[in-house]
């Protein structure tokens, strides 16, 4: 009987450890004229007081933010705009045209909910898959997303060739 209980107890501990783990799936959606970043809390617990740093500088497409009519971007431009959730820029009062990084403060993301923002993203390649004003998923590959939790633990992930990054956070 002891042999039967040990595997059951071990399975419960393993399952409990998995349930306490938090993940944030970050998705880049190309959409003219405004591109969208969605941060989806896929865990079963709320996430509070997050700092998010998005760095496009190592992306395959050498991506930049195109926020004004003049500057490094091409044709259509869109400034940073919160679409869903309680988040705000903390890197500056606005994202400057040609920047490749931005930082956000997110007050909270409920379990299985998301926050999002829009901004225009352009590539700076001489020849690109969709032209400079549109970004393919493969062009955002290698861009970094870094999330720091309230407890000052930082987790980092890279975007894949489909425009997604999965950030594994400490237990919630």
Image: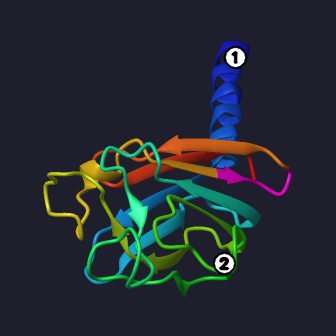
**Residue 35 position in % (x across, y down):** 36, 75
**Residue 67 position in % (x across, y down):** 45, 79
Residue located at (25% from left, 48% from top): 138
Where the N terminus falls, by quadrant? Answer: top right
Task: Give the residues drawn in magenta, as a range.
Answer: 147-151
Please state which of residues 69 and 114 is positioned toward the viewer in this rendering. 69
Residue located at (47% from left, 59% from top): 26
Q: CA distance from mark 1 to mark 2?
A: 53 Å
Q: Is residue 31 visible?
A: yes
Q: Quadrant of residue 77?
A: bottom left
Residue located at (30% from left, 50% from top): 61
Answer above or below: position of 78 versus 157: below
Q: Which residue is mark 1?
A: 1
Magenta residues, dominant SS class: loop
Element marked by disc 1: loop
The circle on residue 87 is 2
Q: Is residue 170 visible?
A: no
Residue located at (64% from left, 19% from top): 4
Answer above or below: position of 78 versus 19: below
């Amino acid at each position: 009987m002891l042999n039967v209980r040990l595997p059951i107890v071990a399975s419960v501990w393993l399952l409990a450890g998995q349930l306490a783990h938090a993940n944030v799936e970050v998705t880049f959606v190309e959409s003219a004229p405004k591109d969208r970043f969605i941060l989806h809390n896929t865990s079963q617990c709320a996430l509070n007081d997050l700092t998010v740093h998005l760095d496009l500088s190592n992306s395959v497409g050498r991506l930049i933010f195109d926020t004004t009519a003049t500057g490094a971007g091409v044709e259509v431009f869109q400034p940073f705009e919160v679409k869903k959730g309680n988040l705000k820029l903390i890197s500056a009062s606005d994202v400057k045209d040609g920047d490749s990084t931005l930082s956000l403060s997110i007050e909270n993301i409920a379990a299985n909910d998301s926050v999002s923002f829009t901004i225009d993203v352009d590539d700076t390649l001489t020849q690109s898959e969709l032209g400079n004003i549109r970004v393919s998923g493969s062009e955002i590959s290698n861009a970094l997303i870094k999330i720091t939790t309230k407890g000052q633990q930082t987790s980092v992930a890279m975007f894949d060739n489909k425009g997604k990054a999965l950030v594994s956070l400490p237990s919630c």
